[in-house]
Amino acid sequence: MKLRLSKAAVVTSVGALLAAGVPLVGLASSGASAAGKPTYTIGVEGPFSGSDANYGDYIYGGVELAINAANASGKYHFTLKPEKFDDQGSSSLSPAAAQKATGTKNLIAVVGPAFSGASEAAAPYYLKAHVAEVSASATAVALASGSSSNFMRTIADDSVQGKADADYLVKVKSVSNLLVISDASFYGDGLAKVVAADATALGAKVTTETIPNVDTGGGGTTTEYAPAATAIATSDPGAIFYGGYSPDFGLLLSALSGAGYTASAHVIMSGDGSNSPSLITSTSPASAANGVFLSEGAAGKVNFLTGKLASSYFKLTKIKASVAEYAAQAYDATNAIIAALVKTKTPATVTTALRKEIVTNLHKVNFKGITGTIAFAGDGDLRNDTGTSAISEVESGTITFLVNEG
Amino acid sequence: MGFEHFWLSGFDQIHTAFWTYLAVGLQNGAVYAMIAVGYTLVYGVLGLINFAHGEVFMCGGFAGVFLTRGILGARVATGWGSVGMVLAGIIVGGLISALVATGVQQVAYKPLRKRHAPKLAFLISAIGASYFLQTLAGKEFGYGVNIFPSAVFEPGQVMFTMFGTSIHTIAVVSIVAAIIMLVVADRIVRATRLGRGIRAVSQDAETASLMGVNIDRTITITFILGGALAGAAGFLYSLQSGIVQNAGTEIGIYAFTAAVLGGIGNLRGAALGGLFIGLFGSFSVPFAFEGNVQWTEIYTFLILVLVLIVRPTGILGQKSGRTA
Amino acid sequence: MISIIMAVVAVMTGTPGSSSAPPTTGVHGSLLERVSFFGLFATWRWVLFFAFAVIIWLVSSFVRPRSRAIRRGMDAALAVPRQLTSKKYTRAGLMVLALIIVIVLPKFVHESFWMYLIVEQIGVWILLALGLNVVVGFAGLLDLGFAAFYAIGAYTTAWLTGSLPAPALFHHPIPTLWVIPIGILAAMIFGVLLGTPTLRLRGDYLAIVTLGFALIIDDFVETQSGVTGGGVGSSAIPHPAVNLGVLHYSWGISPTPYYYLCLVFIIVFIAVFTSLEHSRIGRAWVAIREDEVAAESVGINPLKYKVMAFAVGAASGGFGGVMSAGLVGIINPSLFTYQVSVNVLVLVIFGGMGSIWGVALGAIVIQTATSYLDNYQPWGYQINDLYMYIGALLIIMMIFRPAGLLPSRRRAREFAAAEGGEEIHTDEVLTGDQP
């Protein structure tokens, strides 16, 4: 009895030591760099897994591109490196990702969060840690006036995009009977509300509907789309605007085309959450996406990386720059952070004071980025929002730029 | 006034598009019915809510999708090619699902049976198997990435027009295939020796084994049968909605609701329950408050809860001792 | 034996090589491409899979003859805790030791992120597990919708502090700390309301109806955006604060104060539940669990005690909700899905259903493993793999130790007898239902 007890005890205690040792190793692992140039981390919070992982990759590519250029230029007395923080685009996973980011020792600022709902959830944590968030893609209007003065974005918010959408639908496409569908997410709902309000103000008859998205927490199911599409096809509005993301929009388009409501015979439009090639792969048959209009959070032509930057981007990420949404905004966001960093004393270790300084400096930056002049107003929005939004159309499976609206 | 208007406009919408709603409802219902049969058969022989059954459905769906992609690629099947592809998809989907179902049985349930584990242990093991399969699928095929099969029919192909509404080929194929398979399953369970074995084990496993029924083999057959149906359903489902790694969770709950509604343990009940859930889900869309389609889900579960409180043995009722 | 192979190999498939981007549809690929279904399968991973399968099979055939000795050794190791706690003094001593460790723990945790995880991921879940333990473990009621009580606690907090679109009660938002008793009460009332019509059902039917209700509530909350904030939820729940004349303390964002608040309440709940367990009510629960008809015949009203179990369990769940809302400041319906309910059930069964310490230990083990794996990703682990390992762990646990980590004494006897083939008094819920 005694012998067995001690054997078992030995086994359990060795096991416990091993189990305890591993997290300690993990905790100790985030070491700082050696002497010489200090190394700072710029975090990228966004979806890197799940159905929207492509957006995270686009943004991360833009950040990495800018950082590599900065490191290679030799101009700076510091080295930068990017780091991913995966929140899967979800507002429930975002606080943990934000906590992890702010807990990273040499992190100075974050490009992101990518999704609006995630930004809202993470804001208090970044605020408390005095870490600047410069988002390349979170467009919900409420974010700028929201709970964090550390929040900035290098993209126009949904009031611009929504207004441009409403303008395009009512003024250019002469839509008089519009159905606005929201996917019940923070972003989709906000955008849908703006479009509905603006379209009503322009004189169109607007009805609203909610089809919750299928993503975790959205509560929707794919079998919902078919009956909902039948109902829509029956009431036959002249045009539909969908506020939401590409995986769900694709399912809706598939269901609509099955119900006989096609994009060729009607006007179907959505916002920047659907504006990516993943929309085409999410739609079956893929031809059901042809003729769909998509808007963007910025004016066209400047919206994507071009020329040398585009080829460097492709070499780095193997993603075509012409489809990498928000990569240009991410590039500019990174350069804004660098511009703010340069004005500090660039100490060897990152302190709260440094992070605070970067926030202050960010509010003062003013330079010409590839998407336009980067300067932030007090609430974090771009100061000279051109107020234009690029409208594209899906033609034979590719998204082609049409016109700048607004 | 507003309330009346709500009801009137709802019925009006149904009146205008009745056949479309019916077709969509039957199509969804066919899928639910086939999956529900699997739940109900397993509950009959093991007394277990097979949480992993939704994942079995999902695996069959993926198998069907890969098959079509492998054979067709970017091409479109027509005529006899379509027929062949559908049959191939159903068979392969069913096979793979049956394999997965048997695997789950062998790994997660059989050892528990041998050790006379309590029922809750089976439940937790089922949950474990479900988690495992879903995550493995997500690892391989991506999380939340919805994949469609290749074009087994002309996109949007309409088979015929009835009363002014176009009925799509996908709908007809799903419904017909489901009916055939459900009838075959029903015949197997009622008229064959295998089926008698299943019913015997459902009623009283000990006596059945005394009577010479091989319990292990019967249980395996039950899983194969349920799995095959679910796999075929997976393929048919993917034709319309594509397949994604967590499809099993959402569809599984609906199918399970259907099985309970029809009287768990009762095969015909499960089939009818599935049909009912599909139709109900379709026809309740015009009655969604404020245009929020989520209300159809609420209505469906309300029906489930009400039926359970009022008549727990389900609409068709359990036959004595939970036979099929 | 095949099951051993498959179970172990399954763990092995967690080796690096995460899934690729959405698949292509090419049919004009090379032979290798077609074999791997056009890049859909990471072919080399399946080669590894089979290689490991062969290795494991070789290992297991070596181990098999010695398996009985291994089993005995394992049982001895797992029996150590029971042996240690059999004496009253050792038990008291261990509890004091545990208390000391737990009180000084924050001093040793340097990363505030870990502290946050300890409260949010472990502390809250311990509360949930304790609550469900009362329902499932004490009273033997299979509840698949426990997350609803969690939701009630959180949403009540949000509502009363004025953080929901619907205005607070009497238009007078109250500080979060004072919501704690109200949140607990609300959850208990809800437990009674939910339990009264449904607890007449037995076994699996109860499970299904609780699941149905949980789904309805989840969906309903999402649709009522005007009242509950819909799918977006609420994001500005104020942190608890005490402003009583001399005492001024605000909980803020730092997790450590929450840790202590949570700790106090966990201790309170453990004390209350333990005393309930040994009281007349607890004995009534045992009687109902073992044989409801017999219990009724000696004058115990099953419905009354079952509803009581629901209410008591709901109290703990509701407090977990208040805690969670106060700490994170954000709630939305994705925190109350049926997945959450299932997870809590897993914690309870894994830890040892019916045993308060077992359940707490189970919650600690699984949640710590979850948090660690998800956030510190050791080699070979990709985020999202978590449930694969949990799934495998559950299956293995149920095969080799269905009683859970630290089963209550009664259960341990039942399981041992059942395994030996004896027919001992087992619950209706466990072996079968006769509606």
Image (tube, coloured by chain):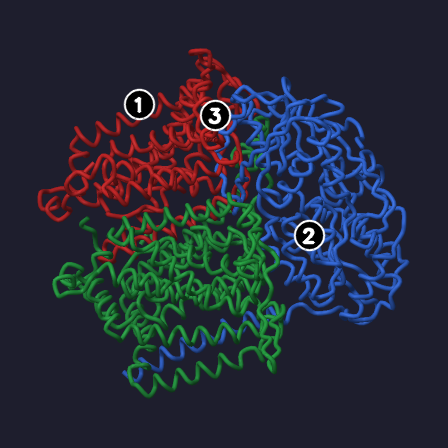
Chain colours: A blue, B red, C green
- Report x, y in % for residue A394: 69, 26
Q: Nearer the viewer, mark 2 or mark 1?
A: 2
At 41% from the left and 61% from the top, the residue drawn is C187
Q: Chain of mark 1?
A: B
- Marks 3 and 2 in Cβ contact (< 8 Å): no
Q: Chain of mark 2?
A: A
At 49% from the left and 49% from the top, the residue drawn is C48
- Marks 3 and 1 in Cβ contact (< 8 Å): no
Label 3 Cα neighbours within 10 Å, binned few <14 / some 14-19 / many ≥20: some
CA gap between label 3 and label 2 equals 43 Å
C332 vs C124: above or below = above
Numbered disc total: 3
CA gap between label 3 and label 1 equals 37 Å
Q: Amino acid at mark 3?
A: Ser
Label 1 Cα neighbours within 10 Å, binned few <14 / some 14-19 / many ≥20: few
Circle 2 sits on which residue?
Answer: A113
Q: Amino acid at mark 2?
A: Pro
Q: Earlier in the sequence, mark 3 or mark 1?
A: 3
Circle 1 sits on which residue?
Answer: B180
- Report x, y in % for residue A63: 76, 50
